[in-house]
Amino acid sequence: MSVHLLWGEDDFLLREAALEIVGDVQPRELDGSEWQGGELSDLATPSLFGERRALVVTDCKALPAHAVAELRAFLTDPPEDAPLVLCATVGERAKAPAALSKLVAPVGEVREIKVTRRDLTGWLLGRARANDVALAQDGAAALVETIGEDPAALAQALEQLTSAFAGERITADLVRRQFRGLGEQHTWDLCDRAFKKDVVGAMRSLQSLLESRADPLMILGAIAARLRDLLRVRSLPERLPPKEVAQRAGLRFDWQVRAYREQARRFDVDELVRLHLEVVEADRALKSGGSGDVVLPVLIASIAGTPVPV
């Protein structure tokens, strides 16, 4: 099977899955919004030198109409030895783009790429095994607790630990030693202050994290994880008991429900959705080379804003 439509919420996971599909082939990578026309011609034409070809298209929801028309014609008879991987980033609880799914399903694979909150520890352990890294169960759990739920930030943190403790078994103690600079100004403290609209305290906490050389992507991952938690909690009826809310929202502790309900009440749903879009933009900015000490203060200011009575 040479045609794949991968969809999910996380750009990093989608790209990793795409590169796994093409294997040792060096693909051409293209953002859907940059489609000019004729990008599929290389796949349809045999190489003079016999090398395999592959095309990975990210952000397929941004493909223009003429690109979809080209795909429709191409998929009537796609070549077997030239992988085409389409990646579509969707919002929470959204599905694969219907038009693309309809095109790909008869001739290829349509697959959701997802790592749930509960699966992050197992995902890290599997990633470590694939790279011959000795990661202990408690080390994986400590990484998620310390870094947050963003897969890209977790992968980067694992690489950092592998370099810092080459050949050693990575335990929870080593994770805490490596990231001890977070100290009391842990990312959860930053999130608590920001979503309580304590703008001064949040900025102070952020500055402490940046001065301790915490990775900006890791900080952003923690903010994104907290925001997703608040959206889930905000969407559930207030009458539900904390234990049931924790189960439905994927939280580990009842006390989180009480704290997150208090924070979520400070925002209406539209505000939380807007902030989610701002987190996505901040992620793009950081991954495009933006400076953490510029991108993150703007985001924190937008979250904390002016205190609102509860």
Image (cartoon, rainbow, N blue to C red):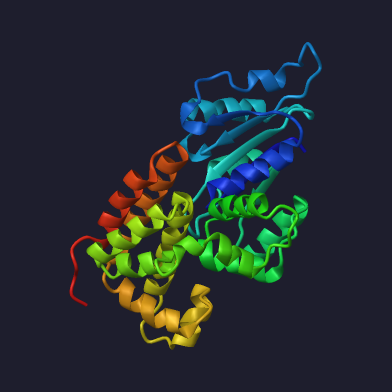
Using the rendered image of the protein, determine whether residue 35 is visible from the camera's viewpoint.
yes
Q: How many marks?
A: 0
- Which quarter of the rendered picture does the C terminus lie within? bottom left
Q: Is residue 133 left or right of residue 271?
A: right
User: Is the residue 209 above or below the residue 240 in the image?
Assistant: above
- Which quarter of the rendered picture does the N terminus lie within? top right
Nearer-the-camera pick, 159 or 79: 159
Residue displayed at 61% across by 30% down: 72
Residue displayed at 73% across by 40% down: 21
Occupied quadrant, residue 6: top right
Q: Is residue 243 left or right of residue 263?
A: right
Nearer-the-camera pick, 71 or 26: 26
Residue displayed at 37% across by 79% down: 259
* Residue 42 placement (x, y as % from top left): 67, 19
Can you name the residue that lies furthest to the top here? Answer: 48
Residue displayed at 49% across by 80% down: 246
Nearer-the-camera pick, 259 or 157: 157
* Residue 261 placement (x, y as % from top left): 35, 77
Using the rendered image of the protein, determine whether residue 143 is visible from the camera's viewpoint.
no
* Residue 296 placement (x, y as % from top left): 35, 50
Q: Is residue 98 left or right of residue 165?
A: left
* Residue 113 placement (x, y as % from top left): 62, 52
